[in-house]
Amino acid sequence: MKLLLDENVDHPLLEPIRWLLRHGKSGSSNVVDHVDDVRWKSIKDKELYAKASRYGYDAVLSNDVSQLADPDICVAIKRSGLSVVFYEVTGNGLAAHAAAAGAVLHCIRQVVADLVVAKQQRIVFIHPLKGADRHFDTVDPDQEYVSDYWPGRRQYDRHKPPPRSKNAKR
């Protein structure tokens, strides 16, 4: 799979995506490039799809789902034969970009595996992370249960369940 990251994709995502795809079933054959690195920055989307197809890319990753609202870009995507993977950055600031990056990194291996099997053009939508801003819990191990084997635990706390995230499914 040869994947091109559009210029609207945060460049720091390039290396983690490369790393994740190298460790897939067909990892060594995956190629991931960013338009900045192939010197195609600022190229119009219609031209980008045609050029990416000519250079042997199989898919483009973009966070600009509004491309699907432009009839000319839709025609360009269709003609290119490329699959396009869209994701959203819902909100402003670093937290919004981190949530979007987390969703992409969580899904990218399965998305690529599905595209390889499909062997024809697909449009993929990666769903954004939802829910509370905090997807983790912090505990004071002197006050709250961590493990039956935590040093200094009181005997009467034994077998108390570990803390669960408020967002975790029960």
Image: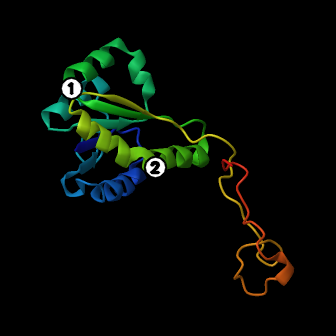
Q: Residues within 10 Å of mark 1 (few under 14, many from 20)?
A: some
Three-letter amino acid code of the residue under disc 1 = Gly
- The residue that appears at 31% across and 53% down in the rendered structure is 21
**Which of 6/60 is in front?**
60
- The residue that appears at 20% across and 38% down in the rendered structure is 57
Residue 55 vs 140, above or below: the answer is above
- The residue that appears at 73% across and 87% down in the rendered structure is 151
* Residue farthest along the right direction in this orientation: 156
Asked if residue 40 can be seen in this view, the reply is: no
- Calculate the distance from the C-alpha at mark 2 to the C-alpha at mark 1: 25 Å
Lower sequence index among marks 2 and 1: 1
* Residue farthest along the bottom direction in this orientation: 152
**Which of 46/75 is in front?**
75
Residue 37 vs 80, above or below: the answer is below
Q: Residues within 10 Å of mark 2 (few under 14, many from 20)?
A: some
Question: Which residue bears the numbered disc 2?
Answer: 106
Q: Quadrant of residue 113?
A: top left
> What's the mark number on residue 81?
1
Three-letter amino acid code of the residue under disc 2 = His
Q: Nearer the viewer, mark 2 or mark 1?
A: 2
Q: Quadrant of residue 71?
A: top left
Q: Position of residue 65 (x, y in %)?
A: 44, 27
Q: Position of residue 157 (x, y in %)?
A: 83, 76
Q: Secondary structure at mark 2?
A: helix
Q: Secondary structure at mark 1?
A: loop
Q: Quadrant of residue 150?
A: bottom right
Asked if residue 159 can be seen in this view, the reply is: yes
Q: Are marks 2 and 1 in contact (CB under 8 Å)?
A: no
Q: Position of residue 46 (x, y in %)?
A: 27, 23
Q: How many marks?
A: 2
- The residue that appears at 66% across and 41% down in the rendered structure is 131
Apparent side of residue 52 relative to residue 60 in the rendered image (left or right): left
